[in-house]
Image: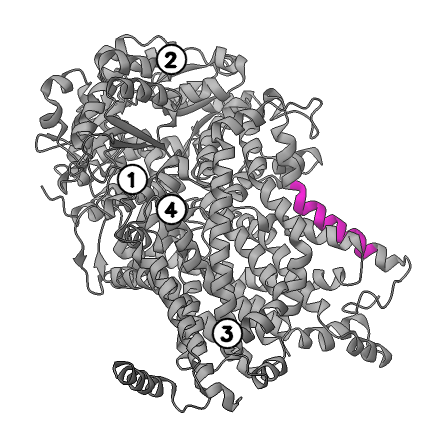
């Protein structure tokens, strides 16, 4: 009797959530299959994200009590020159890196796809090497290479007779963003080459053949056959690049910490400084507000991607 | 000689253009690995030739390695890293294959909402979650334990894996599911017996990408594990960087030791990695 | 889309699977919660289990000595276990861990408080060591090593390593450039540096690590004391009892501007950190490096042996002829004790052992560090440390613990980079920012 009542209750509940009996098992399975991931998300990411959003409206130095700040943290951004600079540099680097890391790896992947047998595999593995090492190692390594007085880059320039090109790569405000951008490209290029290469491998060769028969040259084939076919991959690469660019932190943090004098400060490093390395007291409220700005920019980037994929009708 | 053509189709002979492309790719690959070569050579140099010796040292010295090995207790932290990475990967693969399949192939209520929620993880920089995560893990009583860090990795890295697995499952044909349903198979057995075996390559991609992320993760490990003997490798390496930053041979030796495991794993698994991406990246 | 009648029955097995999976996830994630008192030292344990004292800092200077001290201590106190954690990178590794622990109200029993010592005390998280360890314990410290941790008579931290500042230099280079003796005034130093740059091709001359506000404060705060003649001036500024627009500050900024404009330092100094300076010194590319007494131990380990033999240190120049050679000194390296830890008593026991005269003097001399106590300073043997210890009577504050730390650091960096050139404007910027802050009590 009890079990009968339970059954009717569960039946009612399932009807409420899952609608008509038709396809019910699929719906239930779908919910059940995503539930574990959702639970993990809520506990380890959802609640911390919520706390961060909330902290954006509070003041807290982690040592003392939390007080409400209303919109104070966001008002502070209006006059904060360092924030303005960081915002600009973030957009600049994101744009430049996205442009570079969307187009160049595609060209390289096309060249690799010409078929080099085992040499191609070795080459792609070499290109991917920087992506497998941690940013701790990347930063330490490049700091040594770019050291203004002893670094191997400046030494190399002197040895090949180009001492006039020597720079304080990470210490000169006019050069630092170029240096950082180059290291970021070095670090990520291989990953995108491999993604594109995988995409090219999955393409049907007959279309290229048809185009070749129609007299299309290599360049025309690239733009009129390869690129349109790879559109979903390109879109994914663009999105990953935008998200990585907006969240950029580690490479800059280990190499310059945002310096010299904020010349390479981006939102990610500024957030870190405000929260953990403030010369005054830590400001987790302001830091959280900065994180919220980063999050909003990322969400905008994702909307951009959705809009693009709708437009290109995939 | 046409870009984008299938490699098997045309094994062209040596043409000037092919030689030019080959040289270009070779140069690119060499420039990319130059820092690593320099790093290894520096770690083998005698101390006094760091700044003015020839590029390839006249004499190789291995002293820096035993020193770095001892100072880091490399073996212990290496095993910690292996344990943490293996456990977290098991969790990530389980969660992301199941959920990725559901998002790709099943219709269920709130599907979109749940998916968007999960993906919001990718919009938050890790550094901004450090303190809230610390409080969360402490609240669960899991501070300073491997389990706490493992669960955090599973929670924070599953969403991207779900994203990848979803794309992968979407590339698999619906007909197989239909046929299995007609045979009376349940949704779970369709997933486990029919679809999952087909997704092996996709799992390979997830495993490699997330293994690299876990192995290289520093920020959470630094804060959530306090007991030095429980720490994985990255915080220890970071510590060494701070100590050795004016002792280049020791520093580069430690860096070299730190990257050898990941390079080996990648080189061994890179075929599956590309295969997984190839099958997953192109949908319809 | 797919509608097969067979699928309409919810099979029992499926239901169990759903339940099992979600329950499993929930168990994994939350049920472990109340179990496992994971944090070490969460509670003092009765009987068998020893009490744990977590001991955190970034002072890798003593990384070879700490384990021995701890082993000796644990042999004497079998009921106490000391867990050492050294994170060499302050901002990248140490502070996030410390602040997270503070946020979680689970501070390690003994910790290096960085510039937050006073705030820890004000919020009741740091013990008043004067009360807990007694006046006798404090008597041996140099006052300048402890004064910055005092608030309303409470001592929220005690110095670990004192820090005096000066120029580490290669005397051969000074001689080769025709500079004799140690420059008396800052102006003389500028002349000397330019002479070296001219005579020795490619030499950077005198170097300053100016990549962050702390390092620049090390340099120009002693100038403030130089002009005021009062070692208390910087403390007054820190507590905003004096103004940043006061004459000594403007004079110091003017003098610092002059050193920048007249080429005392290497080019691009805001882009060169301490490590780059040391590397340049080792490679013979720089003649001198302005920094503190925490360097010799590291230099002895890493520099070429012949440079180690030659290396000397000279005191900070005076601001005007005949004036005192004030030198930056505070124990930037210090230890606090967590006030609310249940294991506080054990922590105090370890502090007493750590600072007991024999142990402390041995640690300091064995690690070539500058001690913060008088008795240990007398036992120093290393010539460079000995010289730097002799400057302690001329010690003055070189960093801030108050809320104005940020505005001052940010402004002096803009000033160093040349984005602000007028000393008056810099002083006004600092004062405007500092006046808005809450100094509490």
Do discs 1 and 2 belong to a common subunit? yes
Q: In this rendering, which labeled residue sits more in front, label 1 or label 2?
A: 2
Q: Residue B30: say if magenta.
A: yes
Q: Would residue C356 be seen by someone viewing this image from the given angle?
A: yes
Question: What residue is rendered at 70% in x and 54% in y?
Answer: A124
Kindly indicate whether the residues beneath marks 3 and 2 are on one polypeptide chain. no
Total label count?
4
Mark 4 lies on residue:
C419
Which of the chains bears the disc numbered 3? B
Q: Are marks 4 and 2 on the same chain?
A: yes
Q: Are marks 4 and 1 in contact (CB under 8 Å)?
A: no
Question: In the rendered image, which residue does mark 1 sit on?
Answer: C423
Q: Earlier in the sequence, mark 4 or mark 2?
A: 2
x and y, in percent, of residue C18 in the image = 41, 72
Q: Residue placed at 40% from the left, 72% from the top?
A: C16
Secondary element under disc 1, as helix, strand or loop, is helix
Q: CA distance from mark 3 to mark 1?
A: 74 Å
What label does residue C384 carry, if any? 2
Q: Kindly tell me whether residue C425 is visible in this rendering.
A: no
Q: Is residue C198 above or below residue C418?
A: above
Magenta segment, which residues? B20-34
Closer to the eye: label 3 or 4: 3
Disc sitting over residue A28 in the figure: none
Q: Which residue is mark 3?
A: B188
In front: A6, or A241?
A: A6
Few, some or many residues within 10 Å of mark 3 (<14, 14–19, 20+)? some
Disc 2 crowd rating (10 Å Cα; few below 14, some 14-19, many 20+) is some
- Rendered location of residue A95, percent (x, y): 52, 63
């Amino acid at each position: 009797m009890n079990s009968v009542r339970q059954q009717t209750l569960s039946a009612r509940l399932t009807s409420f959530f899952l609608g008509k009996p038709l396809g019910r098992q699929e719906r239930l399975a779908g919910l059940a299959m995503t539930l574990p991931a959702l639970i993990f998300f809520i506990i380890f990411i959802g609640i911390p994200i919520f706390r961060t959003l909330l902290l954006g409206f509070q003041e807290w130095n982690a040592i003392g009590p939390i007080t409400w700040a209303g919109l104070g943290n966001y008002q502070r951004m209006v006059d904060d020159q360092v924030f303005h600079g960081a915002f600009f540099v973030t957009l600049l680097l994101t744009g430049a890196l996205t442009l570079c890391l969307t187009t160049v790896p595609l060209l390289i992947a096309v060249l690799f796809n010409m078929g080099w047998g085992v040499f191609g595999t070795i080459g792609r593995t070499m290109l991917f090497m920087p992506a497998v090492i941690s940013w701790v190692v990347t930063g330490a390594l490049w700091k040594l290479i770019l050291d203004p007085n002893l670094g191997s880059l400046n030494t190399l320039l002197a040895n090949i007779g180009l001492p006039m090109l020597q720079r304080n790569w990470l210490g000169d405000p006019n050069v630092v963003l170029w240096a950082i951008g180059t290291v970021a490209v070095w670090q990520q290029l291989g990953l995108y080459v491999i993604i594109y290469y995988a995409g090219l491998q999955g393409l049907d060769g007959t279309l290229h053949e048809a185009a070749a028969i129609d007299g299309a040259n290599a360049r025309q084939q690239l733009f009129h056959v390869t690129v349109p076919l790879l559109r979903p991959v390109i879109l994914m690469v663009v999105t990953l690049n935008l998200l990585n660019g907006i969240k950029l932190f580690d490479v800059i943090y280990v190499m310059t910490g945002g310096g010299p004098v904020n010349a390479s400060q981006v939102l990610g490093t500024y957030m870190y400084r405000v929260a953990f390395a403030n010369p005054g007291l830590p400001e987790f409220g302001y830091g959280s507000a900065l994180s919220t700005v980063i999050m909003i920019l990322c969400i905008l980037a994702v909307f951009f991607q959705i809009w693009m994929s709708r437009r290109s009708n995939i | 000689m046409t870009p984008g053509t299938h490699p098997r189709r045309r094994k062209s002979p040596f043409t000037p253009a092919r030689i030019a492309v080959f040289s270009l790719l070779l140069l690119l690959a060499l420039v990319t690995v130059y820092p690593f070569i320099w790093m290894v050579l520096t770690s083998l140099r005698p101390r006094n030739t760091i700044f003015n010796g020839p590029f390839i040292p006249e004499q190789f010295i291995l002293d820096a390695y035993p020193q770095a090995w001892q100072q880091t207790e490399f073996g212990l932290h290496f095993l910690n890293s292996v344990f943490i990475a293996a456990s977290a990967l098991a969790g990530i693969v389980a969660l992301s294959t199941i959920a990725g399949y559901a998002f790709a192939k099943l219709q269920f209520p709130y599907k979109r909402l749940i998916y968007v929620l999960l993906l919001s993880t990718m919009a938050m920089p890790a550094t901004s979650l450090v303190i809230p995560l610390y409080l969360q893990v402490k609240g669960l009583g899991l501070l300073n334990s491997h389990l706490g860090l493992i669960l955090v990795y599973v929670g924070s890295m599953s969403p991207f894996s779900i994203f990848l697995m979803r794309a992968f499952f979407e590339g698999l044909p619906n007909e197989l599911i239909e046929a299995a349903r007609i045979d009376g198979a349940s949704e779970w057995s369709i997933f486990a017996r029919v679809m999952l075996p087909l997704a092996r390559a996709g799992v390979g991609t997830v495993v490699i990408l997330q293994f690299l992320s876990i192995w290289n993760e520093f920020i959470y490990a630094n804060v959530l594990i306090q007991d030095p003997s429980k720490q994985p490798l990255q915080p220890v390496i970071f510590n060494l960087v701070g100590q050795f930053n004016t002792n280049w041979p020791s520093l580069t030796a430690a860096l070299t030791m730190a990257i050898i495991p990941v390079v080996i794993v990648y080189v061994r698994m890179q075929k599956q990695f590309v295969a997984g991406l190839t099958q997953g990246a192109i949908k319809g | 889309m797919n509608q097969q009648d067979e699928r309409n029955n919810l099979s029992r097995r499926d239901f169990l699977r759903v339940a099992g999976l979600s329950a499993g996830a929930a168990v994994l994630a939350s049920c472990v919660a109340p179990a496992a008192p994971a944090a070490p030292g969460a509670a003092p344990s009765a009987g068998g289990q020893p009490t744990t004292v977590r001991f955190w800092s970034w002072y890798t200077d003593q990384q070879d000595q700490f384990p021995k001290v701890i082993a000796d201590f644990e042999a004497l106190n079998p009921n106490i276990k000391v867990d050492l954690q050294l994170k060499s990178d302050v901002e990248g590794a140490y502070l996030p861990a410390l602040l997270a622990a503070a946020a979680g109200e689970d501070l390690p029993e003994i910790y290096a408080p960085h510039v937050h010592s006073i705030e820890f005390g004000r919020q009741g998280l740091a013990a008043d060591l004067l009360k807990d360890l007694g006046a006798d314990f404090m008597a041996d410290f140099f006052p300048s090593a402890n004064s910055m941790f005092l608030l309303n008579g409470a001592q929220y931290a005690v110095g670990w390593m004192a820090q005096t500042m000066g120029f580490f230099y290669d005397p051969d280079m000074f001689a080769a450039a025709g500079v004799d003796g140690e420059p008396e005034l800052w102006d003389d130093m500028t002349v000397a540096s330019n002479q070296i740059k001219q005579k020795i091709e490619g030499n950077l001359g005198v170097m300053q690590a100016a990549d962050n506000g702390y390092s620049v404060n090390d340099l120009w705060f002693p100038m403030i004391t130089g002009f005021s003649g009062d070692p208390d001036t910087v403390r007054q500024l820190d507590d905003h009892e004096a103004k940043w627009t006061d004459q000594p500050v403007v004079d110091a900024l003017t003098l610092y501007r002059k050193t920048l404009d007249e080429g005392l330092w290497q080019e691009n100094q805001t882009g060169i950190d301490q490590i780059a300076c040391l590397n340049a010194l080792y490679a013979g590319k720089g003649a001198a490096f302005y920094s503190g007494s925490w360097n010799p131990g590291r230099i002895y380990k890493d520099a070429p042996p012949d440079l180690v033999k030659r290396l000397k240190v000279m005191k900070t120049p005076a601001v005007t002829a005949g004036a005192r050679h004030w030198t930056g000194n505070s124990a930037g390296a210090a230890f606090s004790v967590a006030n609310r830890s249940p294991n506080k008593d054990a922590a105090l026991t370890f502090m007493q052992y750590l600072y007991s005269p024999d142990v402390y003097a041995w640690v300091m001399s064995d690690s070539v560090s500058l001690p913060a106590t008088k008795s240990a300073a007398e036992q120093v043997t290393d010539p460079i440390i000995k010289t730097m210890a002799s400057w302690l009577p001329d010690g003055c504050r070189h960093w801030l613990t108050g809320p104005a730390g940020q505005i001052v650091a940010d402004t002096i960096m803009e000033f160093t980079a040349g984005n602000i050139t007028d000393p008056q404007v810099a002083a006004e910027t600092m004062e405007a920012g500092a006046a808005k802050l809450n100094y509490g009590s």
